[in-house]
Each structure stands twice: as structure tokens, then as C-alpha cells.
């Protein structure tokens, strides 16, 4: 791998792409520290020093924004509005016939779908920015502790300006991601997510090291084992052999080739964890707005129930087993649900039949669709259990090691490893184009 990176920097075109990508990443990280208008940066830092962020209901959004959300910067929303919009548009292809038709139109339809995703991203950014600014007016709900204020002037003009600034920041992030895709090494949006998550690792590991060296060593060993498992599972495939019959068209013979359908063990990727976390965040978010703000007030019974059973790692206590059980069930459900939405066995079987393809030993048409559905269900079962296990690692680490922000588990490690593997493959493929060793050499 190191030799591949050395050869990449020796290739002028690829070196320019890598340096351009690194420059865009630097701009993105710089924007996460630029405060929005109307926000006092010094007050924000004081609140962060005394913050109780473990178990905060907005923790996942803060993770995907690279810490920009709690700093109320111009990139406070991060890439989350785009991720949410892309997932919604993908799910709507099953419900709306127009979207399903665009999906079948090839590049032109994909361009139109991308345009719809951008529009929806801006709409979601306005909604999320308004919610974040509303919460920031009472910063104790965002930072915890005794944080009094982070906005000296919370008049409506300043609040509207903050919403517009954060929305514009989301649009700028989309543009930066597309620049990386077009002029960089590719996979722009995923690389920005990679940078956001990786930026939180040094601070989290440093905090663990300052508390206990023994705990730090255990965390690193556990993280290495988890990373090895993720690399192994993400590379696992179930290859369905496909044979194409020979056909004579005029004087030419077509077909007669053998190929396969690669089915990943984890076809849903990190989406089930995001869906399950989002649903479990809703009760805590509602309870957060109904907690007493004055000393002596008693919280309603349902708020106490949510804090005890359905909250993630609140300060001073571990996560309840009820939360873990519901979390696991939701991840398994969404793994099957998302896989069924993104992979249609009937459509695959029809396409194979149309072009003369068949699975050896399986009749074309409906038997092929039933066989593919059977295989998908078999590989999704261990894949969903694998996702649930990874998602529970940070919660178990909090209870066993008393590590509130375990960085090497859950959605973060899947994204880090997945994007890293994909980026390395893209760089290697571009190296092969520039340095191909064939018969002419």
C-alpha cells in the first residue's frame, strides 16, 4: 500500500488530484471552526469546556459534522442534510413511479435524481438549521451543564441570518464534495464524511489516555480487533454464478460468457445504524424539551421513563439493557428493509432472462427471483447481526470501561474503513491506467 502511494505521488496527474483533494479537505475543516454570525466564539468555547456531551441526543449529528455543530459554525449541519436527502430519494424510488422511471433512464435519469437530491438537501438544511438555532437559544439543552448563553443578541434578524448562513454552508459542502468527485480522487461526499469522523479521533483517544493508560491500551487493542473484523466482513461477497447462452445475430456470435452477481454480506452498509439511532433519538429529543428548567421542579413521569430506559449513556450512568435490545431489533429490521428496497430479485431475474442469462441449475424467470431472494435473506441475517454487534460496542465499552466517547465502534468505524478501502481501490485503478504493464513494455 505504501509503495502505491509513493507511485501515486510520482504520477503528475494523480499527484495533482491528491493535492487538490487534500486542499478541499483543509478548507472544509477550516469552515468547521468559523462561527456563524451572532455567535460569540469565546462563550461557545467556555460552554464546551464544561459540556456534558456524552449521551447528548444530537451526538450523532455532531459526529458527522466533525464537531462543527456544537461550535455553531457555518458548517454546523455538516453533511447530514445531504445524507438524509439521498436516503429519502432512494427510498422514494419504490413509492413514486416517476422516480422509478428516472432510475431506469441511465445517466440522464441519474442527473435528474441528483438535482432533486440537492433541492431536498437545501430544504432539510433550512429545517435542521432552524431546529439547531432554536435549541441554541437555551444552550444548556445543547451543551448541558450551566451554560447560560452563546448568542449575546438573539433577536429575530440575527436568528434568520444564522439559519441562512448554516444553509449556505451546507450548499457549499455539497459543492466541495462534487469538486472532489470531478477533479480529485473521486468519492467526494464520502471523503468529507471520512474527514469529519476522523477529526474526532485524536481528541477522544487523548481524553481516554489522560484518564487511564491501561484503559487506553485496552481501547486500542479492541479497536484493532474491530477494524480487522470490519475489513474482513466488508470484503465478503456471495458470488452467484451467471451463464449467458450463445446467440447468433447475423454472422456474429454473442454470449456464451460466464460472470457472477456479487452480493455483499453487508448490503445495507451503515444505513440501518443511522435509521435506528435516529428513531431512538426522537423520544430523548422530545423529553429534552419537557425537562424542568428551574430548580425544584419535578420532571413528568414519561420523561423519567425515557431518561432511564431509552437514553444513550447519560452522564453518570450506563445505557440500560432495554435501550440495547430495542436498538438491536431496529438495526436488524432496517437491515432487511433497506436491502429489500435497494435490491429487487424480480428485476434482476427479468434482466437476466431478457439478455439470455441464467444461474446454473436454476430455471430463468420466477425460480431465479425466488432463489436470489432466498440467498439475500440468508446473507442479510449474519450481516444484520454484525451491524448490531458493531453498534453495541460503544455502549458496552461505556458500561465496562467507563469510556463515554468510544471512537472505534458503531457507524464511525464502518464509514472510516469502507471509505478508506474504496479510496485506495480508486487510486490503484488510476495507477493501473498510467502504469500498465503489458506485452508492449
Image: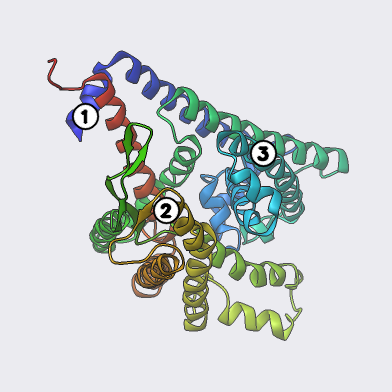
Quadrant occupied by the N terminus:
top left
Q: Which quarter shows the C terminus?
A: top left
Report whether 368 appears left or right of 130.
left
Q: Secondary structure beneath disc 1? A: helix
Which quarter of the figure has residue 55?
A: bottom right
Residue 256's place in the image compared with 402, above or below, is above
Q: Please give the residue where the numbered disc 1 appears in the rendered image.
A: 4
Mark 3 neighbour density, 10 Å: few (under 14) some (14–19) many (20 or more): some
Q: Which residue is mark 2?
A: 352
Residue 349: image x %, image y %? 45, 59
Apparent side of residue 172 relative to residue 9 in the rendered image (left or right): right
- Which corner quadrant of the image does residue 264 belong to? bottom left
Q: Given this view, does label 2 or label 1 mark the residue nearer the observer?
A: 2
Which residue, given by chain and number where applicable, does mark 3 sit on?
118
Q: Residue at coordinates 35% horizontally, 37% vertically from top-left?
A: 423
- Residue pictured at 40% horizontal, 75% vertical: 399
Q: In front: 104, or 350?
A: 350
Amino acid at each position: 500500500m505504501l509503495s502505491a502511494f509513493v507511485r501515486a505521488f510520482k504520477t503528475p496527474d494523480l499527484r495533482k488530484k491528491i493535492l487538490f483533494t487534500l486542499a478541499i479537505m483543509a478548507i472544509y475543516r477550516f469552515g468547521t471552526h468559523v462561527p456563524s454570525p451572532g455567535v460569540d466564539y469565546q462563550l461557545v468555547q467556555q460552554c464546551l469546556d464544561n459540556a456534558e456531551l456524552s449521551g447528548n441526543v444530537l451526538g450523532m449529528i455532531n459526529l458527522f459534522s466533525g464537531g462543527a455543530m456544537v461550535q455553531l459554525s457555518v458548517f454546523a449541519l455538516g453533511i447530514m442534510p445531504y445524507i438524509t436527502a439521498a436516503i429519502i430519494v432512494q427510498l422514494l424510488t419504490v413509492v413514486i413511479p416517476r422516480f422509478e422511471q428516472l432510475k431506469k433512464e441511465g445517466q440522464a435519469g441519474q442527473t435528474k435524481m441528483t438535482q432533486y437530491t440537492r433541492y431536498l438537501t437545501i430544504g432539510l438544511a433550512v429545517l435542521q438549521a432552524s431546529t439547531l438555532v432554536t435549541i441554541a437559544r437555551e444552550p444548556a439543552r445543547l451543551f448541558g451543564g450551566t451554560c447560560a448563553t452563546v448568542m449575546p443578541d438573539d433577536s429575530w434578524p440575527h436568528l434568520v441570518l444564522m439559519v441562512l448562513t448554516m444553509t449556505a454552508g451546507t450548499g457549499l459542502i455539497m459543492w466541495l464534495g462534487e469538486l472532489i468527485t470531478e477533479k480529485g480522487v473521486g468519492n467526494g461526499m464520502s471523503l468529507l464524511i471520512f474527514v469529519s469522523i476522523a477529526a474526532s479521533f485524536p481528541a477522544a483517544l487523548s481524553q481516554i489516555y489522560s484518564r487511564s493508560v491501561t484503559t487506553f491500551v485496552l481501547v486500542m487493542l479492541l479497536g484493532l480487533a474491530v477494524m480487522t473484523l470490519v475489513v474482513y466482513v466488508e470484503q465478503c461477497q456471495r458470488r452467484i454464478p451467471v451463464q449467458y447462452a450463445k446467440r447468433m445475430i447475423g454472422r456474429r456470435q454473442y454470449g456464451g460468457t460466464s460472470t457472477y452477481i456479487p452480493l455483499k454480506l453487508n448490503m445495507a452498509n451503515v444505513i440501518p445504524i443511522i435509521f435506528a439511532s435516529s428513531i431512538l433519538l426522537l423520544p430523548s429529543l422530545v423529553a429534552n424539551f419537557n425537562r424542568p428548567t428551574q430548580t425544584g421542579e419535578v420532571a413528568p413521569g414519561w420523561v423519567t421513563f425515557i431518561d432511564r430506559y431509552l437514553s444513550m449513556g447519560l452522564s453518570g450512568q450506563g445505557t440500560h439493557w432495554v435501550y440495547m435490545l430495542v436498538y438491536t431489533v431496529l438495526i436488524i429490521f432496517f437491515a432487511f428493509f433497506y436491502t429489500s428496497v435497494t435490491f429487487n430479485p424480480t428485476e434482476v431475474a427479468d434482466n437476466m432472462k431478457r439478455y439470455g442469462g441464467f444461474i446454473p441449475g436454476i430455471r430463468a424467470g420466477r425460480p431465479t427471483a425466488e432463489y436470489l431472494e432466498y440467498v439475500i435473506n440468508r446473507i442479510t441475517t449474519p450481516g444484520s447481526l454484525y451491524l448490531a454487534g458493531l453498534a453495541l460496542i460503544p455502549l458496552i465499552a461505556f458500561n465496562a470501561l467507563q469510556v463515554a466517547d468510544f471512537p472505534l465502534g458503531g457507524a464511525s468505524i464502518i464509514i472510516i474503513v469502507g471509505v478508506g478501502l474504496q479510496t485506495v481501490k480508486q487510486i490503484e485503478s488510476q495507477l493501473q491506467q498510467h502504469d500498465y504493464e503489458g506485452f508492449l513494455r
